[in-house]
Image (cartoon, rainbow, N blue to C red):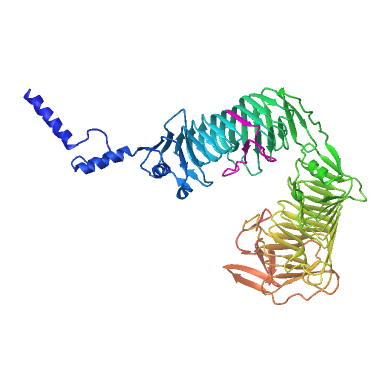
């Protein structure tokens, strides 16, 4: 008994000191009663009931407060509170005390914003005209006349608002637009029968999704058990972009769509996929789905075969569901591979229609609409052909920069319209090209080109006037049976009528080039260049052919040379050097099959060549080049007229061998399979 009494006394003593037994973060056990009171007040502060706007804002901005309970309606009425209120503290909740009669949070100002964080929640409140954003979850609320963004909204009523949300569940929306959605809408009813949507708007819009890279997976959005009623506009709009990772939309469960003016669902842009896996019902007389460039840029998957489909002349697909209350619109049926066009609109529609393979231009067409300045043709190997091979119809533009991309063109006059390649097999045949900044195609044949610039891989049987030829292609290049007259073109310094920088090969066969100034042919890189057949070059200003430093953006190998082969009849008109070649033996080599060239190097190692087939006076070759034995970088070389020698050389009665890099070699050498 005595022991028990002592135990009771000990417990009472401990309690009188205020020691807390249990898992607490801090204690003021042995301090004054004032400190103990402070701790109790701080503990209470985790949950705060508010009844005025000042109490509400103070609690929201206090990071110690975890739960804010509204016990009545609150109106933000003070001017100093008309601002952005930042919610402080994590896991903070704003809760209405009543779950039935939700208290109202409203304002008479326009700029009241409550900004939450990733872990802020709102529950059991009516929010009117107060902008709410960056909230984690909103539950069992009524939201009116505002913009709202949240990770998740459920069991709520939203009216006359705009919503940005990741997931929306078990809710009813009236006169409200979902401007962005991340993952899912489940069991949602949207009634916009009294909302005037602008042209192109929809209650649900999915914007293009851009990932960190092209390999990122597509965004996936699920709509399940959704009912949408519209006065006008689309019920669902899915926007795409050629740079987006794509959006996959899944329609599950019961989907009921009602609209009176536009297609219920619109897929526009690129990289969109719509999976119709559930029961898709439509109320109204419009198409159920419109898919721009269907089967090419956008795709529809019909799991239960409830859709019928047709395509128009632009390649747009139209779909009707079999589950319909209303009159079904007639589907278009355009599948022909060849169409004739006579207007700008008809031409653009055909170029963008993946089903059209051949477009016949019946007459002249001028691009006059701003949105037609850049046309990315849809469909592989598409042809644009003028009806007449003699009086070619003219395709021109009212704008400075108009670009057509990915098209084969035949029997047309192209004036001031740039052509870009797409597949690498684009071809222009029997055309006249004028006043064009750049034409980039694989092949141009039987054509006339004036006042332009071309980037080609194959140029055949054509005439060029005041036009430069360049090349950025990977692979072999050929220019054959072509006449270039640039006698009225002022080439800038270092420019040429034909320029090549590559690491493959370029062949000129039966080519005539006349220049006012500048080089006829300028070659850089590490390629093999062949001059075949009759090559006629004319210039009065500088050397006709410049073989420059052997750098190539496509090949950095140390021992690959730029090699120029003179295999044909090289004739020059004029009084300048035929060829100027830099770094002969180091980076460049020239082979003269028919011994047409006289040559010598200057003291800097640059070699100058004169063809023996000349109309004009040949300039004197330099005489200050290196001669005889030269010891350079610990290697012996032998020079003749400034040019390094290679192979077997009889020097003063003794035979020496120089390898392909002009270096003298000693000891046994394997030359063409034979040891010496």
Q: Is residue 536 visible?
A: no
| Range shown magenta | 188-214
* Helix, strand or loop for the magenta stretch, by majority: loop
Determine whether, in the image, residue 551 is placed left or right of residue 49.
right
Which residue is located at x 78 percent, y 36 percent? Answer: 355
Magenta stretch: residue 192 in it?
Answer: yes
Residue 459 horizontal/vertical position (percent): 81, 54
Say which quarter of the image contains residue 491. Answer: bottom right
Quick check: 19 above or below 644? above
Quick check: 394 above or below 223? below
Say which quarter of the image contains residue 579. Answer: bottom right
Image quadrant where one finds the N terminus: top left
Front residue (pair 187, 107): 107
Residue 665 horizontal/vertical position (percent): 62, 63
Residue 527 horizontal/vertical position (percent): 71, 57
Residue 620 horizontal/vertical position (percent): 78, 76
Front residue (pair 585, 419): 419
Which residue is located at x 51 percent, y 44 percent? Answer: 108
């Amino acid at each position: 008994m005595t022991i028990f009494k002592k135990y009771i006394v000990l417990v009472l003593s401990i309690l009188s000191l205020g020691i807390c037994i249990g898992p607490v973060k801090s204690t003021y056990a042995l301090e004054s009663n004032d400190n103990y009171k402070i701790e109790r007040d701080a503990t209470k502060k985790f949950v705060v009931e508010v009844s005025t706007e000042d109490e509400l804002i103070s609690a929201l901005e206090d990071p110690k407060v975890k739960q804010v309970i509204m016990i009545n309606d609150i109106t933000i009425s003070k001017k100093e509170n008309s601002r952005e209120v930042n919610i402080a503290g994590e896991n903070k909740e704003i809760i209405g005390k009543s779950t039935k009669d939700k208290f109202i949070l409203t304002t008479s100002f326009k700029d009241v914003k409550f900004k939450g964080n990733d872990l802020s929640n709102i529950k059991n409140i009516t929010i009117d005209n107060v902008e709410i954003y960056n909230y984690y979850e909103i539950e069992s609320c009524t939201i009116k006349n505002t913009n709202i963004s949240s990770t998740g909204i459920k069991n709520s009523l939203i009216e006359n608002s705009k919503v940005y949300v990741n997931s929306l569940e078990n809710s009813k929306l009236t006169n409200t637009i979902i401007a962005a959605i991340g993952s899912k809408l489940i069991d949602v009813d949207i009634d916009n029968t009294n909302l005037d949507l602008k042209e192109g708007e929809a209650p649900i819009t999915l914007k293009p999704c851009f990932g960190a890279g092209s390999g990122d997976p597509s965004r996936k959005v699920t709509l399940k058990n959704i009912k949408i009623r519209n006065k006008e506009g689309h019920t669902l709009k899915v926007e795409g972009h050629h740079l987006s990772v794509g959006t996959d939309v899944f329609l599950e469960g019961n989907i009921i769509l009602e609209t009176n003016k536009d297609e219920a669902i619109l897929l526009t842009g690129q990289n969109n996929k719509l999976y119709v896996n559930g029961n898709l019902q439509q109320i109204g007389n419009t198409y159920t789905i419109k898919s721009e460039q269907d089967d090419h840029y956008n795709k529809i998957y019909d799991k239960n075969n409830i859709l019928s489909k047709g395509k128009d002349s632009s390649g747009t697909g139209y779909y009707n569901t079999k589950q319909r209350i209303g009159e079904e619109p007639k589907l278009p049926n355009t599948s022909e591979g060849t169409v004739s066009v006579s207007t700008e609109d008809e031409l653009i529609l055909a170029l963008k229609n993946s089903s059209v393979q051949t477009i016949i231009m019946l007459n002249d067409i001028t691009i006059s609409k701003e949105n037609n300045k850049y046309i990315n043709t849809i469909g592989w190997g598409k042809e644009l052909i003028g009806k007449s091979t003699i009086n070619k119809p003219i395709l021109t533009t009212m704008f400075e920069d108009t670009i057509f991309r990915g098209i084969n063109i035949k029997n047309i006059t192209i004036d001031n319209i740039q052509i870009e390649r797409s597949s690498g097999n684009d071809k222009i045949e029997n055309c006249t090209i004028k006043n064009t900044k750049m034409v980039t195609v694989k092949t141009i044949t039987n054509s006339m080109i004036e006042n332009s610039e071309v980037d080609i891989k194959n140029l055949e049987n054509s005439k060029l006037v005041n036009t430069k030829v360049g090349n950025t292609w990977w692979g072999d290049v050929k220019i054959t049976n072509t006449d270039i007259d640039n006698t009225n073109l002022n080439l800038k310094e270092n420019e040429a009528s034909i320029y090549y920088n590559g690491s493959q090969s370029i062949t000129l066969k039966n080519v005539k080039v006349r220049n006012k100034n500048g080089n006829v042919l300028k070659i850089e890189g590490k390629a093999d260049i062949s001059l075949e057949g009759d090559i006629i070059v004319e210039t009065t200003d500088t050397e006709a052919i410049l073989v420059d430093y052997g750098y190539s953006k496509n090949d950095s190998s140390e021992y690959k040379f730029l090699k120029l082969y003179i295999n044909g009849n090289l004739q020059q008109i004029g009084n300048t050097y035929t060829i100027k070649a830099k770094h002969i033996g180091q980076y460049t080599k020239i082979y003269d099959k028919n011994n047409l060239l006289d040559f010598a190097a200057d003291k800097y190692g640059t070699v100058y060549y004169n063809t023996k087939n000349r109309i004009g006076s040949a300039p004197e070759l330099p005489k200050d080049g290196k001669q005889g034995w030269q010891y350079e970088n610990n290697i012996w070389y032998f020079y003749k007229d400034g040019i390094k020698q290679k192979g077997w050389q009889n020097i003063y009665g003794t035979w020496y061998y120089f390898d392909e890099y002009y270096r003298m070699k000693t000891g046994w050498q394997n030359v063409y399979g034979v040891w010496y």
